[in-house]
Amino acid sequence: MHTEAVDTATYETKRLQLFERHGFVGETRWVSDSDGRRTWLLDRVGETRPTVLIHGGLSQAGSWCLVAGRLDGRVVIPDRPGWGLSYPFDYGSVDFRQGGVDWLSTVVDSLDVEDVDLVGASIGGYIAASFALTHPDRVNRLVMIGAMPGLHGKIPLPLRLMGNRVIGPLMARMKITDPEVNRKRVFANLVAHPENVPVDVLQDDVDAMSLAGAGHTGYTMMRSMCTLGGFHPSVMIADELHRLDCPVLFLWGDSDSFMPMDVGRQVADRMPDARLHVVADAGHSLELDQPHVVAEQVQAFLHG
């Protein structure tokens, strides 16, 4: 099966149907920052403290479709800048870390609550942790899923190449149009069992990457974060995480190829209230690899 590029209205409809098929129904709305830039989010309104799910790097809100419906209470799922339906963004124009904190501040402020629970996958975990360090009074509990940037200087070669000024733009123009090709070329590097990822999730990823500007967003994001040698020093965050005094849970796949789990364990051991839970038979993108385990762990940690 192949796909053509989709317009944003068609994409929004298809993604909402994806969430509904996997048990999550929420209200869509737009949140504007002080410059009028609009973030798209899906909000299942409830009376409990909001749980904000922040997607990973080369991804968008749809990556949470297998987990969101398994969580209780109010759940808010935004598209990060440049991804999905949120405003176009060139990450070369800002400090990556501060830009992430500023964006998440806009999202949290829009919820009209004192504090939130944050659940971030990969780069989403990095943004969540950066926000918690900057605004400790706004975060009740924090979950980081998969190896996140800034704990260790190394980064997989394909991601380093994506940020290269010569190779990166070429990679940004390459498009996968078949979900089964996506399974073999992309998801095989993200999960331990790509054969188990539902085809509608693969199709959603293909559709999202066909949206205007997605490739350029990926290039500028990786360029702002790393060189051919690894992460920029400005991205490193491991030595600051001991300042987090809210309860923290690291969920780490035993087959995460992005970073050894010992790195996460050492970081967690230096923090005042953190623990690392290793998920067996799982890769980097746990929310797609073992969504039932992720949901159980998150649910128990936030509401247990």
Image (cartoon, rainbow, N blue to C red):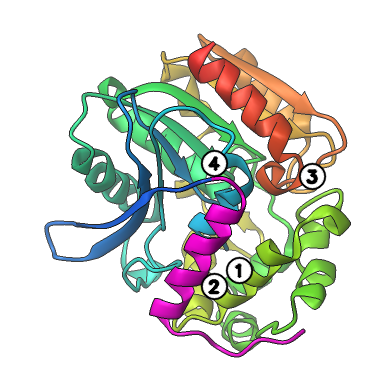
The magenta-colored residue range is 1-23
Contact between labelled residues 1 and 2, with CB atoms less than 8 Å apart? yes
The alpha-carbon separation of the residues under discs 2 and 4 comes to 19 Å
Query: Helix or strand or loop: what does disc 4 sit on?
Result: helix
Drawn side of residue 72 relative to residue 173, left or right: left
- Percent x, y of residue 185: 81, 71
Pick the residue in front: 156 or 287. 287
Q: Residues within 10 Å of mark 3 (few under 14, many from 20)?
A: many
Q: Amino acid at mark 2?
A: Ala
Q: Position of residue 266 (x, y in %)?
A: 68, 21
- Crowding near pointer 4: few (<14 within 10 Å), some, many (20+)? many
Q: What numbered label is drawn on residue 68?
A: 4
Tell me which residue sits at (66%, 43%) in the image: 287
| Contact, mark 2 vs mark 4 (Cβ under 8 Å) | no
In the picture of the structure, the residue carrying the numbered disc 1 is 204
Residue type, mark 3 in image: Gly
Residue under label 3: 283
Distance between the alpha carbons at the discs numbered 1 and 3: 20 Å
Whichever of labels 1 and 3 marks the residue nearer the N terminus, that label is 1
Q: Quadrant of residue 136?
A: top left
Residue type at the position of mark 1: Asp
* N-terminal-most mark, 4 or 3: 4
Rounded to the nearest angstrom, the CA distance separating label 1 from label 4 is 16 Å
Q: Who's the residue at 74% across and 75% down the image?
A: 179
Residue 208 tag number: 2
Of pointers 2 and 4, the one earlier in the residue sequence: 4
